[in-house]
Image (tube, rainbow, N blue to C red):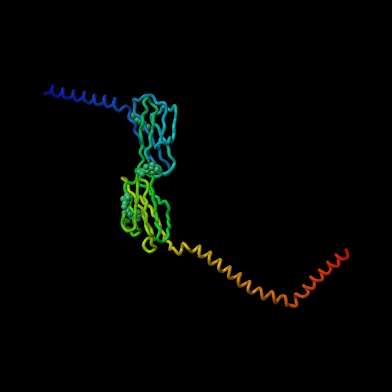
Amino acid sequence: MAAGADVRCAVLALLVLDLLATGGDATGPVITGQYASSADKVVLSCNMSAPHAPIRGHKWMLGDKTLKAEEGNSDSFITYTIEGKVEEHSGVYECIYETNPVAKGNVSIEVQPQVVAYKKSEHGNEGDTGVLTCKSLSYPPVGNWFWFRSDQTPVVNGTDRYIIKSNGNKTELRILKLSIEQDTGDYHCNGTNMLGPGSATVNLRVRSRLAALWPFLGIVAEVLVLVTIIFIYEKRRKPDEVLDDDDGGSAPLKSNATNHKDKNVRQRNAN
Ligand SMILES: *[C@@H]1O[C@H](CO)[C@@H](O)[C@H](O)[C@H]1NC(C)=O
Ligand SMILES: *[C@@H]1O[C@H](CO)[C@@H](O)[C@H](O)[C@H]1NC(C)=O
Ligand SMILES: *[C@@H]1O[C@H](CO)[C@@H](O)[C@H](O)[C@H]1NC(C)=O
Ligand SMILES: *[C@@H]1O[C@H](CO)[C@@H](O)[C@H](O)[C@H]1NC(C)=O
């Protein structure tokens, strides 16, 4: 009995050793990535477990953008600091060690959708198509977008005059044949990912066709008023001028002018 237990123990120990050995060989050093955030900064870090090949440097990347590169740094624990709120810097960051072969780890910053309205206030003319747009550039992308009226009634794609087009970054609500009574008001775009919801509000104002004409009508009215004023002025001026001519007051002026003319004539004659 005792001998049997010893053998079993030995076999178990060998198995554990085997697992450790093959595990180590197959995966190589392990890179642990994580982040810590405060109100105004986010610190990403990667740590490569020993043993590992000599490190000749490292870099941090987001997508295909290199954020920081340090040649000649042999540290296995590396950090990268981002100024700002964590919500605005979500994404999958990569730490890349220059070893042979290159070793990569990643730090994934995941947040609830940070939804913003493309324009907080939109306006359209009666009868036209209204377009309301919201976007979220946070990670993970939005899985589902919903639109609601301000009274929480859902706006359903394909019903009434609504067409909704969405992807992970963006949602667009088109309202056909805008109506002042039915469509004016607030619309909420709500996006959700696995971390929760996010939303923004867009206010839609619908102007009447006539309102769109107001500036034009204003100019027409202005021109009409000016033309009328000029017309009245001209009509009233003519009799005035006639009166002026008959007026005694203008007689001396006339005689002055004739005197002047006479003088000139005299001068010319003298010369
Ligand atoms: C990095 O990982 C090693 C184990 O591989 C650990 O001993 C060390 O404390 C870690 N360094 C930091 C700064 O976490
Ligand atoms: C809304 O419906 C149209 C077709 O009627 C479709 O092309 C579009 O993908 C739909 N949008 C959503 C968000 O389901
Ligand atoms: C988000 O937008 C980018 C371009 O800004 C695009 O490359 C990417 O495919 C979009 N993502 C999704 C999930 O649509
Ligand atoms: C959608 O977002 C608005 C705020 O923008 C919020 O009042 C409303 O409760 C949300 N609706 C749902 C169903 O999440």
- Residue 33 lies, with reference to residue 196, above or below; the image says above
Quarter of the image containing the C terminus? bottom right
Which residue sits furthest front?
269
Q: Position of residue 97 (x, y in %)?
A: 39, 29
Quarter of the image containing the N terminus? top left
Quadrant position of residue 254: bottom right
Q: Position of residue 142 (x, y in %)?
A: 34, 46
Q: Position of residue 45 (x, y in %)?
A: 38, 35
Quadrant position of residue 239: bottom right
- Residue 236 lies, with reference to residue 159, above or below; the image says below
Instruction: Answer with the quadrant where ligand 1 appears in the image.
Output: top left
* Nearer to the camera, 87 or 116: 116
Q: Position of residue 128 (x, y in %)?
A: 40, 58
- Residue 259 lies, with reference to residue 204, above or below; the image says below
* Nearer to the camera, 221 or 156: 221
Report how many numbered discs are placed on residues in the image: 0
